[in-house]
Image (tube, grey):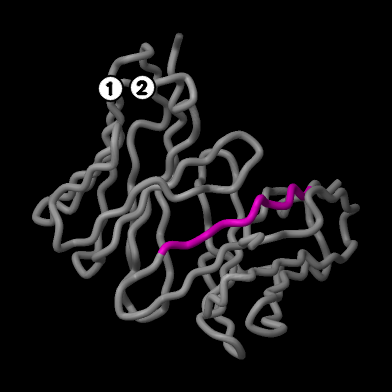
Amino acid sequence: NAGVTQTPKFQVLKTGQSMTLQCAQDMNHNSMYWYRQDPGMGLRLIYYSASEGTTDKGEVPNGYNVSRLNKREFSLRLESAAPSQTSVYFCASSAPGRLQETQYFGPGTRLLVL
Amino acid sequence: GENVEQHPSTLSVQEGDSAVIKCTYSDSASNYFPWYKQELGKGPQLIIDIRSNVGEKKDQRIAVTLNKTAKHFSLHITETQPEDSAVYFCAAYDFSGTYKYIFGTGTRLKVLA
């Protein structure tokens, strides 16, 4: 049981390049999330997927797209990377029900855009 | 929407002393409040949580208190140890049916040996 896994761990991009961050969970969770973490700003929600087949914008969605490929996988795509997207990206999953459930986080992807 | 404020942003304590981190939230409908610990280079991990029908919860050296009337909740760590050094985040569950957590901005705790 690996929990939440993310690839790659680290990536350097040039401005204008594109890339996809991958996330997978093996806990049979319905909901998945993408956050970015910047110094002094905590965790900000980019996009989330409450269940397979649905995605919704979070607090900072501009410049990103997501795909909920199946129940296990939720990818984040940067179509044209900008230096402002330099950050640490975390994927999380949860199994919300009548009682709110814990979010489990992956180890993160560190992205540097030059 | 929900807004969560967390204080202090940094906290240094001597080993063995207690540490307290405080958060306030704005949406009275929020009813679930987790605390996460993030060690350097790792993702956040849940350390304790509390639901709105409970005023206090303890787990060994860690406790969380909730004051619904004042809309604030606090993390208490007693007998601090060097391995408690990390960044701690509070969060509130945005109970609007969208399954979104709103996180505080984090507290960097340093336990001095």
Please tell me in which quadrant of the rendered image residue A21 appears: bottom right
Say whether residue B68 is left or right of residue A23.
left
Image coordinates of residue B53 in percent, x first then y, are 14, 63
The residue segment tinted magenta is A102-111
- The residue under the point 57% across, 63% down is A92
Image coordinates of residue A103 in percent, x first then y, are 47, 62
Please tell me in which quadrant of the rendered image residue B109 appears: top left
Image quadrant in which the N terminus of chain B is located? bottom left
A7 w.r.t. A94: above or below: above
Pick out the residue farthest to the front: A1
Q: Are marks 1 and 2 in contact (CB under 8 Å)?
A: yes
B110 w.r.t. A51: above or below: above
Give the residue pinned by disc 2. B80
Residue A87 lies in the magenta stretch: no
- The residue under the point 66% across, 55% down is A89
**What is the three-letter code of the residue carrying label 1?**
Ser
Say whether residue B3 is left or right of residue A23.
left
Residue A108 lies in the magenta stretch: yes
Image quadrant in which the C terminus of chain B is located? top left
Image coordinates of residue A19 in percent, x first then y, are 85, 65
Pick out the residue farthest to the left: B69
Which chain is indicated by disc 2?
A: B
Give the residue pinned by disc 1. B18
Total number of numbered discs in the rendering = 2
The residue tagged with tag 1: helix, strand or loop?
loop
Say whether residue A66 is left or right of residue B55.
right
